Amino acid sequence: MAVDDEMQVLSEWCEQLAKALQIPDLDVDQELLLDVARKAADKVIHAAAPVTAFMVGYVAGHEAGKGNAGSEGSREATARAADIAFRLCEDRANSKDGEGAGHTGAM
């Protein structure tokens, strides 16, 4: 399947899932979530991909629940959480013992 076809299927799936979860207006940065999941799978372990994407999304939802609702606040929270995840993936990959460099970012 071509990349364009995959992205179309992903967009349709996200729309269908959002409707079923009763969040039809959710604006998902699919490329960012795919990138952070790919990085986690590559730099940590494959199973880290969905867990990392979930946690990044959780932070965005948490921010929205604190009154920062709306697509802009959610987008910013997602970007901040993804940036932290990217840095942790790199720290982990760069550490000799696989324990990670211990970097934690504050939200």
Image (cartoon, helix red, strand yellow):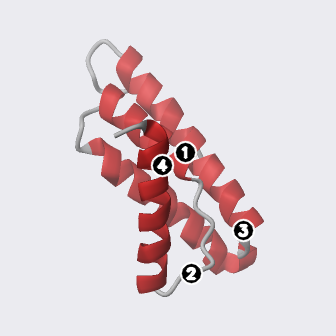
Is 96 or 32 nearer to us in this picture? 32
Mark 1 or 4, nearer chain start: 4
Kind of residue at badge 2:
Pro
How crowded is the residue under tag 4: few (<14 C-alpha within 10 Å), some, or many (20+)?
few
Residue at image coords 49%, 87%: 22
**Apparent side of residue 63 relative to residue 16 in the rendered image (left or right):** right
Closer to the chain start, of discs 3 and 1, is 1
What secondary structure is found at the residue carrying circle 2? loop
| CA–CA distance in space, label 2 to label 3 | 12 Å
Q: Going from the N terminus, do you reach mark 2 or mark 1 first?
A: 2
Residue 91 seen in the current view: yes
- Tell whether label 3 touches label 2 (CB within 8 Å): no
Quadrant including the C terminus: bottom right
Label number found at residue 24: 2
Label 3 and label 1: CA atoms lie apart by 16 Å
User: Mark 4: which amino acid?
Assistant: Met
Q: Disc 1 residue type?
A: Glu
> Quarter holding the N terminus?
top left
Q: Is residue 106 above or below residue 23?
A: above
SS for tag 3? Answer: helix
Disc 4 or 3, which lies upstream in sequence? Answer: 4
Query: What kind of element bears circle 1?
Result: helix
In the image, residue 84 sits, relative to residue 11, either above or below, namely above
In the image, which is nearer the foreground, mark 3 or mark 1? 1
Q: Which residue is mark 3?
A: 71
Q: Nearer the viewer, mark 1 or mark 4?
A: 4
Alpha carbon distance from label 4 to label 3? 21 Å
Outermost residue to the top: 96
Compared with 25, 82 (above or below) is above
Answer with mark 2 or mark 4, whichever residue precedes in sequence: 4
Q: Is residue 45 above or below residue 20?
A: above
